[in-house]
Amino acid sequence: MAPMKPPPRGDAARIRIIGGRWRNTRLSVPASPGLRPSSDRVRETLFNWLSPLLPGARVIDVFAGTGALGLESVSRGAAHAVLLERDAALVHSLREVVRRLAADDAVQVVHGDALAWLARHSGEQFDLAFVDPPFDADLWQASLAALLPRLAPGAWLYLESPNHNVPVLPPGWSLHREGRTREVRFALYRAPEPRGADTLARNVSVAVPE
C-alpha cells in the first residue's frame, strides 16, 4: 500500500468542526510526522452514527492529533473529553483551541504517551473512545489492551485503520457500523454488557468517496 499523503500545508492546512455549538471552528493541521486527520466526509459519516449517543458522554481520544474527534464530540453534546497527545507542538495547538473556545471545563488536554497514561489511569470510565493512531506505528492492539479496561459497560469504540489491517477485538465486542474510503477503514464497535437498548443498526457498511 502506498504511504498516506500528508495534509497540505500553509493556509490550506486546516480542518473544521462540522456540527454543534462550535460548528465551522477551524483547526490547524501542524506539520507533524504521522499526523493524518480524518477527512471531513469520514467525520461527518461517523458523527451521524454517533449523534444519539453523545449527550452527556465521557469521551477519550487516545491519539488526539488535531483534536477534531474529541472536540467535535463536545461540540455536539458530550459532557467531557480527554485528549491524549505526545507531540508537544500538537499539544500547544490543542490547548490554544481549548482556550479560544473557553472549553477548559469540558476538554482536558494531556501531554504524554497515551499507553503510559492509560496504564496509570484508574479514575472515571469512558463511554466513547476514539483510536486513530499513526498508521506506521501499528499501535492498534497495544492501544486496545491498555484502553478497553478503562471503558464503561456498553461503551462505544471508534477505530480507524488501513483497509488491509483490521484490528481484532476481544470476544463480546460487537461491530455496529463500518465504512471505507480508498485507503482507510473506519468502524464503530460496542462493548459487552450494554446498559441500554442499541440505537444503531448492526453491520451497516458504507463507502465514503474521497
Image (tube, rainbow, N blue to C red):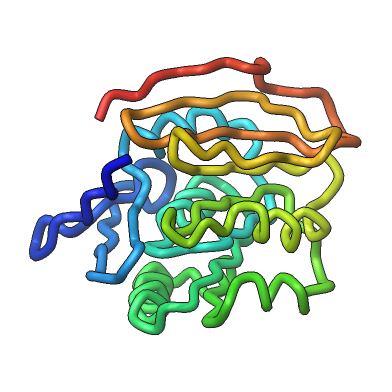
Q: Is residue 201 above or below residue 88?
A: above
Q: How many marks?
A: 0
Query: In the rendering, at what x and y percent does residue 25 appear?
Result: 29, 55
Q: x, y percentage for residue 110?
A: 56, 78
Residue 67 falls in image quadrant:
bottom left
Q: Height in image: 45 above or below 99? A: above
Q: Residue furthest front?
A: 1
In the figure, 192 relative to 26: above or below? Answer: above
Q: Residue at x 51, y 45 (%)?
A: 76
181 or 109, which lies in front? 181
Residue 48 left/right relative to 41: right
Q: Quadrant of the C terminus?
A: top left
Image coordinates of residue 173 in percent, x first then y, are 78, 34
Q: Is 145 on the left-hand or right-hand side of 210? A: right
User: Which residue is at a point 34% across and 75% down the rendered structure image?
Assistant: 93
Q: Residue at x 76, y 43 (%)?
A: 155
Q: Quadrant of the N terminus?
A: top left
- Residue at image coords 86%, 44%: 153
Give the x, y percent position of residue 109.
53, 75
Occupied quadrant, residue 114? bottom right
- Residue in front for this viewpoint, 112 or 98: 112
